[in-house]
Amino acid sequence: MHIAVLAGDGIGQEIMTEALRALDALGLDDLRLDHADVGGVAYRKHGRPLPEETLELAKTADAILFGAVGDPELDGLRRELRVESAVLGLRKELQLFANLRPAKAFAGLEDLSALKPEVAGAIDLLILRELTGDVYFGEKGQRTTEAGRREGYDVMAYDEDEVSRIAHVAFRAAQGRRKKLCSVDKANVLQTSVLWRKVVEEVAAEYPDVELSHMYVDNAAMQLVRNPGQFDVVLTGNIFGDILSDQASMCVGSIGLLASASLGTSTRGLYEPIHGSAPDIAGQGIANPSAMILSAAMMLRHSFGMETEATRLEAAVAQVLEQGVLGQDLGGSASTSEIGDAVVAQLAS
Ligand code: ATP
Ligand code: MG
C-alpha cells in the first residue's frame, strides 16, 4: 500500500497528523507513506503550488491522502500559480472525475445540527459531485467590454461523455444503497443542465432497478434543509455539488465531519475532507480532524478494498463523537490532538 501524503496548508498539517496516527493504530501491514508538498507550502518552497515531484508521486502512489490547500497571504498570485489550482490540477491530471461525499447523521449529534433533531437524524445520503468539468474548468478570464466596463466570465460546459461517466458511477452507487437517485441541475435556465438531464435519462435505461428523479438546484438546497431524509444518492455537477455538500455538512453538524473520495476509472483515488484549509483557525490546534480521519477510511475502502478496517475506523470516529469528545466546531472544547487521542484509544479498546 503506497500512499502519497499531501497535507498542504492551514489546518491540513494538523488534521493529517491525526489521520496518520489513526491509520497507524489500525496496525496495517505493508504501509508505505511518502510525504510531498502541495499548495501554499509548495509555492513558498518550490515556486509552484503543484511541483512536478508531487504530481509524479501522486501518479505512482496507489492512493493520495490530501489535507487542504488555501493560503490567504498568497491570494494575489496569478491564476496558474494560485494555491487552489494545485487540487484542481491533481483532479484533472489524475482524471478523478467522481467525487463521493457521504453525509450521514451521527448518533448523539442530532441536537447540534442546524436542523431539528428528528429531521437531522434521518440524514443518510451520498452526494456524487462531478469534479473535472463545469465552470471550474471552462474558459475563464477578465476583459474590458466595448462599453469600457470590466467583465469577468467563466464558461459552464459539460459534454455528454463527462455526464454519462459520472451518471454511471451514481447509478451503481445507488444500486449499492437504497436505489434512489436524484439528479440535481438547473435545466429551466441552463443549457448545460438540459443536456445533463437528457444524458442522465439515457443512462437510466441501463439501471431499471434505480428510481430516478430530477430536482432544480434551488429546490434541492431547500429540500436538503426541509427534509434531507428523502435523499439517497444526489448526482450533480461541480459547482452545485460544492455548495450543496457544505450545506449538507451543517445539516449533519459541522463541516469538520464530512469526508470525500475523488475517483476515476482505476482504484487510485484522492481522499480529502470536504472543508478547506480554514486559515482562520490554523495553527491553534482546534480543528476537527474527523473529516480527515474519515477520508482515510474511505481510502481503505475504495483504493484497497479493506472494508473491515474502513468500518472500524468509521465506527471509532462515531463512538468518539457519541462519547461527547467534541471540538469547538461542535460547541465542545476538545483539541485536534485530544480528538485524535480518543480515536486511537477507541481503536485500541
Ligand atoms: P475551500 O474553498 O477550500 O473549500 P472554504 O473557503 O470553503 O475553503 P474552509 O477552509 O472550508 O473554507 O472553512 C470554512 C469555515 O469552516 C471556516 O470558518 C473554518 O474555520 C471552518 N472549518 C473548516 N474546516 C474545519 C474543521 N476541520 N474544524 C473546524 N472548523 C473548520
Ligand atoms: Mg468550501
Image (cartoon, rainbow, N blue to C red):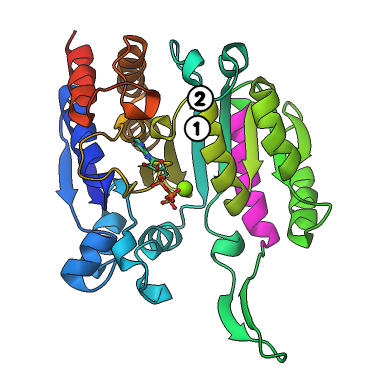
Number of numbered discs visible in the structure rendering = 2
- The residue under label 1 is 249
Residue 248, placed above or below residue 280: above
Q: Quadrant of residue 215?
A: top right
Q: Secondary structure at mark 1?
A: helix
Residue 221, placed above or below residue 86: above
Instruction: Give how far across and how far down residue 205 sits, in percent.
Output: 78, 39
Mark-to-mark CA distance, 1 and 2: 5 Å
Q: In front here: 57 or 289? A: 289
- For the point 66% across and 65% down, which residue is it? 156
Residue stretch rendered in magenta on the structure: 158-174
**Position of 116 compared to 17: left or right?**
right
In this view of the protein, can residue 48 be seen by the observer? yes
Q: In front here: 5 or 71? A: 71
Q: Main secondary structure of the magenta part?
A: helix
**Position of 167 compared to 198: left or right?**
left
Q: Secondary structure at mark 2?
A: helix
Instruction: Give how far across and how far down residue 152 sits, in percent.
Output: 60, 75
